[in-house]
């Protein structure tokens, strides 16, 4: 399982295979992807896969609140493809949605204490309370 911060780009690859030989093969129609959220049987975000090469497909999207992603919930990306008239769905990824990064590559941090001492609202180490 991975962790994806809110508003981050999500990218995953999927493959389609010949059922008899296992070799990569192009799907009959463009495969689709769907993101499901923990406890919700209806997809929250969907799209079409993009072909990279024969039988290799790519999906990309943004894990934003506008696209239905919720911090603290698990999300699952599924790919559905038709090969030789047979439809199949597979899980490409599962991930936990975390709070957005405040600066690209640096996680957002909420510091309430340093070495056990509560920090007040202006960032000084003066303990809160009486």
Image (cartoon, rainbow, N blue to C red):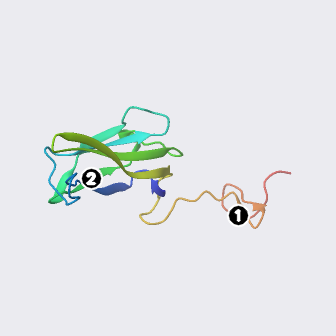
- Where residue 97 appears, x then y in whole percent? 48, 50
Quick check: 22 left or right of 6?
left
N-terminal-most mark, 1 or 2: 2
Quick check: 57 left or right of 66?
left
Q: Which residue is mark 1?
A: 124
Q: Residue furthest front?
A: 20
Image point (44%, 51%), residue name: 94
Image point (71%, 56%), residue name: 120
Q: CA distance from mark 1 to mark 2?
A: 45 Å
Image point (34%, 55%), residue name: 9
Image point (78%, 63%), residue name: 116
Q: Residues within 10 Å of mark 1 (few under 14, many from 20)?
A: few
Q: Which residue is mark 2?
A: 59
Give the structural element (helix, strand or loop) at label 1: loop
Mark 1, mark 2: which one is toward the viewer?
Answer: 2
Say which of 53 and 68 sits in front: 53
Q: How many marks?
A: 2
Q: Quadrant of residue 33?
A: top left
Say which of 55 and 72 sits in front: 55
Say which of 124 and 89 sits in front: 89
Give the structural element (helix, strand or loop) at label 2: strand
Residue 16: image tag: none
Q: Residues within 10 Å of mark 2 (few under 14, many from 20)?
A: many
Vertical arrangement, residue 16 with respect to residue 32, above or below: below
Q: Residue furthest right?
A: 130
- Where residue 13 appears, x then y in whole percent? 29, 57
- Where residue 66 appears, x then y in whole percent? 37, 40
């Amino acid at each position: 399982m991975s962790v994806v911060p809110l508003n981050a780009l999500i990218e995953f690859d999927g493959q389609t295979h010949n059922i008899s030989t296992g070799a990569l093969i192009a799907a009959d129609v463009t495969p689709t992807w769907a993101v499901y959220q923990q406890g919700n049987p209806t997809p929250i975000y969907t799209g079409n896969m993009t072909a990279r090469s024969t039988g290799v497909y790519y999906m990309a999207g943004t894990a934003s609140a506008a696209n239905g992603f919720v911090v603290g919930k698990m999300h699952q990306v599924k790919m559905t493809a038709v090969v030789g008239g047979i439809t199949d769905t597979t899980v490409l990824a599962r991930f936990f949605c975390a709070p957005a990064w405040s600066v690209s590559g640096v996680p957002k941090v909420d510091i309430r204490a340093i070495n056990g001492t509560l920090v007040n609202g202006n960032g000084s180490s003066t303990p809160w309370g009486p």
